[in-house]
Amino acid sequence: MLIKIKGPGEVTESEVTSQDLYLDRRRFLRLGAGSLLTAAALSNEIWQPALAGNKLAHVIKGPYTVDEPLTPYESVTTYNNFYEFGTDKEDPSRLAASLKARPWKVIIDGEVARPGSYDIDDLIKPHTLQERVYRLRCVEAWSMVIPWVGVPLADLLKRFTPNSRAKFVRFETLYDPKQFPGQRRSVLDWPYIEGLRIDEAMHPLTLMAVGLYGEVLPNQNGAPLRLVVPWKYGFKSIKSIVRITLTEQMPVNTWARSAPDEYGFYANVNPQVDHPRWSQAKERRIGDYFKRETLMFNGYGAEVAPLYSGMNLRKSF
Ligand code: MTE
């Protein structure tokens, strides 16, 4: 079936289904048309509802949760950085309806024993979903506290058996200017690429998120699959991932390619190393009036500082 995908200018706010209306439609489907669904499709839907706003079932409380007031859902989903939709904070929530998060394939390749292209649901299904409340500190000196839902990246990668040459992990966002209007402009070198060292990727804090606030990830937050690395600046947390490649060489990440003097590969939150154009010593928690001190490794030093022992973090920024 061919579906005409609307351009960004063609989508008006009134066309975007409100959450209430959307949930009513789901209820109607369950009551009325539900009998038309096969048992397999139904059970699949119950374990992993595919659309933004659906409640995720069987989520357990995960470790490493911070006990700090949550940033309201409204701010988490309307104040975003997702340049594939535009460079303004409101662009992603305004335009994100053009992204189709299902069906969705993720390629896992490179230095692994079992490379392949996997459906997102098959990728996530064997894992128990965990809710973890993490701080997110953006390089632009604002921060949020977000209840993510996801699975540890290490658990996912281990299933594909990385070999001894796997020293880094490279992540790639979908490239499709029809779905991502921002990709029609060369603001960045598309597709968006990020990378981690293998020990960072395997660290138990590193999460592959499929949801937030107990619901399927909204498109503007990186549906259907995004990385969350809470001790690094937010730009490492790449959204809408279609490819995960285990590599021997350090990948060149998008921001380091576009401005190597300003953004490095490591991007560990570090209040002592300023960005060339602004200080990183303080940050504004979204919703707060006063700024607060930025914490080394975003407050996750006890867990991650040993990963960098002996390294000069001014040089490896
Ligand atoms: N991933 C992609 N593909 N494109 C982007 O522009 N922006 C990054 C990161 N991941 C970005 C991305 C930046 S700069 C930040 S701060 C976080 O996403 C923001 O995540 P949030 O909008 O869910 O808060």
Image: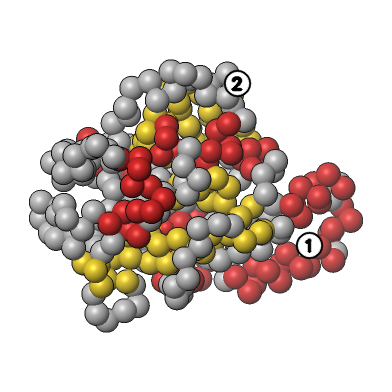
Q: Is 27 on the left or on the right of 294, as rendered?
A: right
Mark 1 highlights which residue?
29
Q: Is 223 on the left or on the right of 187, as rendered?
A: right
User: Which residue sits furthest bottom?
Assistant: 289
- The residue positioned 38% from the left and 47% from the top of the image is 304
- The residue positioned 47% from the left and 66% from the top of the image is 66
Looking at the image, tell me whether mark 2 or mark 1 is earlier in sequence order: 1
**230 up-or-down from 258: above or below:** below
Q: Residues within 10 Å of mark 1 (few under 14, many from 20)?
A: some
Q: Quadrant of the C terminus?
A: top left
- The residue positioned 53% from the left and 38% from the top of the image is 154
Q: Is mark 2 within 8 Å of ligand 1?
A: no
Q: Amino acid at mark 2?
A: Arg
Query: Percent position (x, y) of residue 67?
Result: 48, 71
Query: Percent position (x, y) of residue 249?
Result: 33, 22
Q: Quadrant of the N terminus?
A: top right
Residue 186 visible in the picture: no
Query: Percent position (x, y) of residue 9?
Result: 38, 58
Q: Which colouring convention does the figure follow?
A: secondary structure
Q: Is 249 in front, or is 99? A: 249
Which of the labelled discs sits on residue 137, or is there none?
Answer: none
- The residue positioned 66% from the left and 59% from the top of the image is 60
Q: Is 115 on the left or on the right of 59, as rendered?
A: left
Q: Please tell me whether mark 1 sits on a helix, a strand or a loop.
A: helix
Q: Amino acid at mark 1?
A: Leu
Mark 2 highlights which residue?
114
User: Which residue sits furthest left?
Assistant: 276
How many marks on residues? Answer: 2
Q: Is 288 in front, or is 80? A: 288
Q: Please tell me whether mark 2 sits on a helix, a strand or a loop.
A: loop
